[in-house]
Amino acid sequence: MKAESLPFIVKYASAIKETTNFWSDLDFSIVENEEDKVVIDLGQLEIHYVDENTEPFEEYKFATAKQGRGIGSLIYLEIEGLSELFKKLRKLSPRILTEIKANHWDGREFMFSDPDGYLFVAFSMKQ
């Protein structure tokens, strides 16, 4: 068995407007922008941020809890212009969680979080 694709992931947000502004300030494309949802285009993957108070399925409501958001899950983004992204994020402090460092596969990376605490690692294979 194998998945056909991984077109999007869903994350719950406490403030859609803040999330929209965060990704827009980093020059990522906003594909859809509604009062209770924003879709961010990261290239080969979209993140669908949904207002945490609007989950329609009772069985999924546990996933909207703020406690533990971002813990145990890292989303890796291969970035062209890693230093430029780092500088933009520096202005949005305290979103940067690590400095740019060499990784184990001859690239460079740093960790940051979005406004809801979800964790991302921006990396580049170019030294």
Image (cartoon, rainbow, N blue to C red):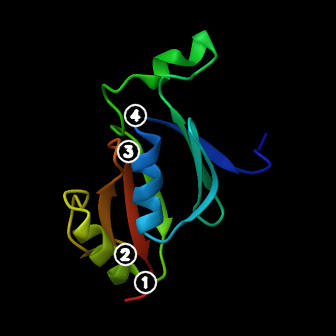
Amino acid at the residue labelled 2: Leu
Front residue of 42/39: it is 39
Residue at 52% x, 16% y is: 61
Residue wearing tag 2 = 85
Q: Is residue 42 left or right of residue 92?
A: right
Which residue is depicted at the point 52% across and 67% down? 28
Alpha-carbon distance for marks 2 and 4? 24 Å
Q: CA distance from mark 1 to mark 2?
A: 6 Å
Seen at 24% across and 61% down, the residue is 96
Residue type indicated by callout 4: Ser
When asked about the image quadrant of residue 21, the answer is bottom left
The reply to whether residue 103 is visible in this rendering is no
Secondary structure at badge 3 equals: loop
What quarter of the picture does the N terminus occupy?
top right
Tag of residue 23: none
Nearer to me, 105 or 120: 120
Q: Residues within 10 Å of mark 4 (few under 14, many from 20)?
A: some
N-term mark: 3 or 2: 2
Which residue, as the protein is rendered here, is positioned at the far top? Answer: 58
C-beta proximity under 8 Å, tags 1 and 2: yes
Residue sitting at 34 percent across and 27 percent down? 66
Crowding near the residue tagged with mark 1, few <14, some 14–19, many ≥20 C-alpha atoms within 10 Å: few
Q: Report how far apart the C-alphas of labels 1 and 4 lie in the structure.
A: 29 Å
Q: Which residue has dot 1 on it? A: 81
What residue is shown with label 3? Answer: 118
Q: Tell me whether the residue at label 4 lies in contact with that at label 3, contact meaning CB atoms closer than 8 angstroms.
A: no
